[in-house]
Amino acid sequence: MRPIAIMLTLLLAGSAQASPTADYWLALTTLCGKAFAGQLIDAPADDEFAGKSLVMHVRDCSDTRIRIPFVVGDDLSRTWVLTRSGDRITLKHDHRQADGSPDDITLYGGTSSNAGRAGEQLFPADEETREIIEPAFANVWTMRVTPGEVFTYGLWRLGTPRVFRVDFDLSTPVEPPPAPWGWKD
């Protein structure tokens, strides 16, 4: 579905029942097809992303799923997959090998516990994530969007000093990167 069709569908469907989830989804779908450069704001000292180019590409959007590849340098292995069901959104991290096969550690994440805010959604780790990455049981991911300004992806591991945050400049789109590893459009 094209971004304009998604926006109209969401506006018509949600006009009488606007919710923070619907507003958040609309803000993301307006970015569909565009890519943005990011800057590492907070990360562990040994973080593998330091000094590398960071790009998010809102590549695929529908009324129930948004896929956002997150490119680190030349590494095309990461895609954030957001799935909407009513007033809840699930975030999963799809990690792939260069040949397109799933990574050993993939599809971890969580589901929002409430409708969130129009500009921010929080995703506490789910049971599947705890089974995949035991220490991640205390993870909370956040995604914030301020239209025309910034998109923030963040991770906090509660009870530890582990924090990670990247801000993407939404005011200046960049050239979209190649398709992520394993993608079939």
Image (cartoon, rainbow, N blue to C red):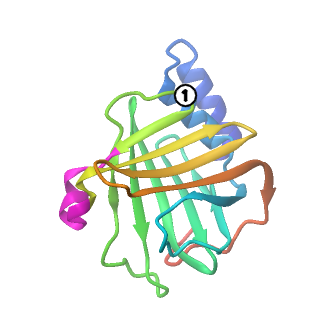
Tag 1: residue type? Ala
Looking at the image, residue 103 lies above or below residue 133: below
* Position of residue 131 in the picture relative to residue 184 (left or right): left
* Position of residue 28 in the picture relative to residue 140 (left or right): right
Please tell me in which quadrant of the rendered image residue 70 appears.
Answer: bottom right
* Position of residue 19 in the picture relative to residue 129 (left or right): right
Which residue of the protein is positioned furthest toward the top in this rendering?
Answer: 16
Measured as percent of width and height from the top left, residue 43 is found at: 50, 62
Is 95 or 182 nearer to us in this picture?
95
Measured as percent of width and height from the top left, residue 166 is found at: 58, 56
Which residue of the protein is positioned furthest toward the right in this rendering?
Answer: 172
* Position of residue 69 in the picture relative to residue 160 (left or right): right
161 in the magenta segment: no
At horizontal 66% and vertical 64% (from top left) the residue drawn is 55
Measured as percent of width and height from the top left, residue 94 is found at: 42, 66
At horizontal 23% and vertical 54% (from top left) the residue drawn is 137
Measured as percent of width and height from the top left, residue 79 is found at: 50, 64
At horizontal 65% and vertical 74% (from top left) the residue drawn is 51
> Quick one: quadrant of the C terminus?
bottom right
Residue at disc 1, secondary structure: loop
Label 1 neighbour load within 10 Å: few <14, some 14-19, many 20+: some
Is 60 or 130 nearer to us in this picture?
130
The magenta segment is 124-135
Prevailing SS of the magenta stretch? helix
Looking at the image, residue 31 lies above or below residue 38: above
131 in the magenta segment: yes
Looking at the image, residue 112 lies above or below residue 177: above
Is 112 or 85 nearer to us in this picture?
112
Q: What residue would you read off at disc 1?
A: 118
Which residue of the protein is positioned furthest toward the bottom in this rendering?
Answer: 99
How many marks on residues? 1
